[in-house]
Image (cartoon, helix red, strand yellow):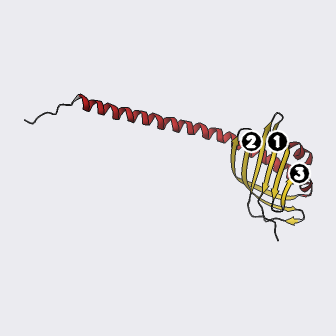
């Protein structure tokens, strides 16, 4: 008959350490997965708020609702287009001359940091700015909103659609 191995207390201790390490690792993994799910749910809220704010702006652009656009602009508003930067007054002047056709908004990415929502997205639109036609190919835009006591205000906008030559 062969010898029966005797499990030493040391071996039992190593086994307990491995089991303990495994349990701690699995607990951490489950906590991270649970936390990531919570972050994802928050991101859906940010996405819907940011996307809705952008959609409101584009509706105002299309309908030439300058009073609404002006009321949404935060002090210090700034925009950038291929032909340069504009302050709020210059942007409103441009928007009064904007001639939009049908448009499609897509590929929203929304980030909320402190009191700001940053929204990047693509727009396919027939538009004329400063009497120049822009490409109808989807083009990137970046719009930033600032949370104030009176609600979300439009603080910055980047139009990355190149002007046709």
Label 3: which secondary element: helix
Q: Residue furthest left?
A: 1
Q: Are marks 3 and 2 in contact (CB under 8 Å)?
A: no
Vertical arrangement, residue 30 with respect to residue 64, above or below: above
Task: State which quadrant residue 76 falls in.
Answer: top right
Residue at screen point 80% across, 62% down? 82
Circle nearer the N terminus (2, 1): 2
Separation of disc 2 and disc 1 at Cα?
9 Å
Task: State which quadrant residue 11 falls in.
Answer: top left
Residue behind mark 2: 116
Q: Position of residue 24 (x, y in %)?
A: 42, 33
Residue at screen point 74% across, 41% down? 116
Q: Position of residue 44 (x, y in %)?
A: 66, 41
Tag on residue 59?
Answer: none
Q: How many marks?
A: 3
Tag on residue 153?
Answer: 1
Residue at screen point 47% across, 35% down? 28
Tag on residue 63?
Answer: 3
Q: Pointer 1: residues within 10 angstroms few (<14), some, or many (20+)? A: many
Vertical arrangement, residue 104 with respect to residue 41, above or below: below
């Amino acid at each position: 008959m062969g010898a029966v191995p005797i499990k030493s207390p040391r071996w039992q201790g190593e086994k307990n350490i491995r089991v303990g390490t495994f349990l701690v690792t699995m607990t951490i993994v489950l906590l991270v997965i649970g936390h990531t799910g919570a972050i994802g749910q928050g991101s859906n809220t940010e996405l819907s708020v940011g996307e809705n704010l952008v959609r409101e702006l584009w509706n105002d652009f299309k309908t030439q609702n300058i009073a609404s656009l002006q009321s949404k602009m935060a002090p210090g508003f700034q925009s950038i287009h291929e032909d340069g930067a504009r302050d709020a007054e210059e942007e409103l002047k441009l928007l009064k001359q904007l001639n939009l056709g049908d448009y499609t908004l897509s590929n929203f990415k929304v980030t909320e940091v402190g009191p700001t929502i940053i929204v990047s997205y693509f727009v396919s639109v027939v538009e004329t700015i400063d009497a120049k036609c822009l490409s109808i190919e989807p083009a990137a835009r970046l719009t930033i909103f600032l949370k104030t006591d009176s609600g979300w205000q439009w603080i910055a906008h980047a139009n990355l659609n190149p002007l046709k030559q």
